[in-house]
């Protein structure tokens, strides 16, 4: 474990991750690390048309989360403890839900390259809640881009998070059911959460494994897995398109990829279709607008 502990809080949209991090940061003399999700220019479009905007939204999130965690975590842990309201690993969970085929293959290859550079937490606090409670909390905070949130999407996220945490091996996990635990309004509930985290950090053993949740693959899932396997097998044989090379050079210039690898990177093989190329162009434009 680091001299200063690094705690990550995870859970589905609306479960209370950011609220808990803000409440605990003073108690643990910790620096809060909050996800800057509202900077994603594709997010509102994604919630209204997930199929159309999934790839742009996911790649932008991936690069943004990488830049924040790669830059902030090592420096913060030299000064104090750190509590974050997200992990870098969870980005892949959303990608598996929202992407398929070539787009998922592109994403997986980029995520694998970047994940090696991200520090792992000492403890993962997993906040759980039922679907009705999650929908009520999302409605209560009333973010404009969440008003049309699909109930089925939140349920798929909830189940995916349970599966993600059940297989999580980067650090110990403390799971907390929040359906009957209002740590915002009830100081005793907050005390309970605080003491459970302290005990988990002291003991290093945290909970029984989550129950196994069978995963049923749809035809689309099988197709996506097949595409990914073929892409991995043919990684060295992807055609190098001249226009794609220009686009990826722009991505390289305006993202933390150059910081990560410290040298020019042959990423042309990540883009194999015109649709991916168009998405990469739009991502480049948004990144340039933010940086200049």
Image (cartoon, rainbow, N blue to C red):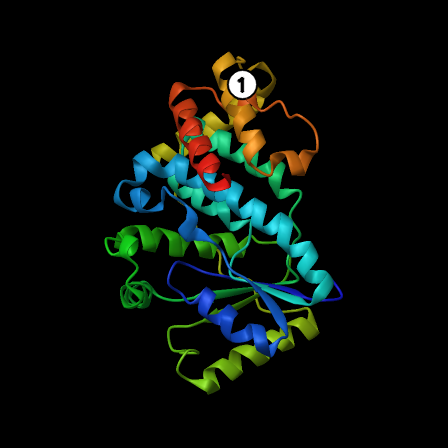
Residue 213 in view in this figure: no
Residue positioned 66% across, 71% down in the render: 201
Q: Between residue 231 and residue 41, name the one nearer to us.
A: 41
Q: Secondary structure at mark 1?
A: helix
- How many numbered marks appear? 1
Residue positioned 56% across, 37% down in the render: 255
Residue positioned 57% across, 50% down in the render: 68
Q: Splitting the image into 4 quarters, where does residue 57 fall?
A: top left
Q: Is residue 265 above or below residue 203?
A: above
- Looking at the image, which residue sits at the far right? 3
Lateral position of residue 196 relative to residue 205, left or right: left
Lateral position of residue 201 relative to residue 243, left or right: right
Residue 254 in view in this figure: yes
Q: Position of residue 273 (x, y in %)?
A: 42, 19
Q: Position of residue 262 (x, y in %)?
A: 70, 33
Q: Between residue 59 and residue 67, name the one nearer to us.
A: 67
Q: Quadrant of the N terminus?
A: bottom right
- Looking at the image, which residue sits at the far left? 148
Q: Position of residue 74 (x, y in %)?
A: 69, 55
Q: Position of residue 96 (x, y in %)?
A: 44, 41
Residue positioned 55% across, 34% down in the render: 254
Name the residue tied to disc 1: 245
Q: Between residue 208 and residue 64, name the one nearer to us.
A: 64
């Amino acid at each position: 474990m680091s001299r200063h502990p690094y705690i990550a809080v995870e859970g589905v949209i609306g479960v209370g991750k950011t609220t808990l991090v803000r409440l605990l940061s003073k108690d643990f003399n910790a620096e809060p690390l909050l996800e800057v999700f509202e900077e994603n220019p594709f997010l509102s479009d994604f919630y209204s048309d997930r199929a159309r905007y999934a790839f742009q939204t996911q790649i932008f999130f991936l690069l943004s989360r990488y830049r924040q965690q790669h830059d902030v975590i090592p420096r913060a842990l030299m000064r104090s403890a750190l509590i974050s309201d997200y992990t870098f690993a969870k980005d892949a969970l959303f990608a598996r839900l929202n992407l398929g085929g070539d787009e998922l293959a592109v994403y997986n290859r980029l995520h694998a390259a970047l994940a090696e550079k991200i520090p792992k937490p000492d403890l993962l606090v997993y906040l759980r809640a039922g679907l009705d409670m999650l929908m009520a909390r999302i409605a209560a905070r009333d973010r404009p881009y969440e008003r049309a949130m699909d109930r089925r999407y939140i349920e798929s996220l909830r189940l995916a998070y349970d599966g993600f945490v059940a297989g999580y091996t980067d650090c110990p996990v403390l799971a907390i059911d929040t359906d009957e635990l209002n740590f915002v309004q009830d100081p005793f509930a907050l005390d309970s959460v605080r003491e459970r985290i302290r005990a988990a950090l002291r003991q290093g053993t945290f909970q029984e494994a989550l129950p196994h949740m069978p995963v049923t693959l749809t035809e689309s899932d099988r197709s996506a897995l097949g595409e990914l396997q073929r892409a991995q097998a043919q990684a060295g044989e992807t055609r190098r398109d001249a226009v794609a090379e220009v686009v990826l050079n722009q991505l390289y210039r305006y993202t933390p990829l150059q910081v990560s690898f410290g040298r020019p990177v042959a990423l042309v093989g990540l883009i194999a279709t015109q649709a991916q190329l168009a998405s990469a162009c739009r991502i480049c434009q948004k990144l340039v607008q933010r940086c200049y």
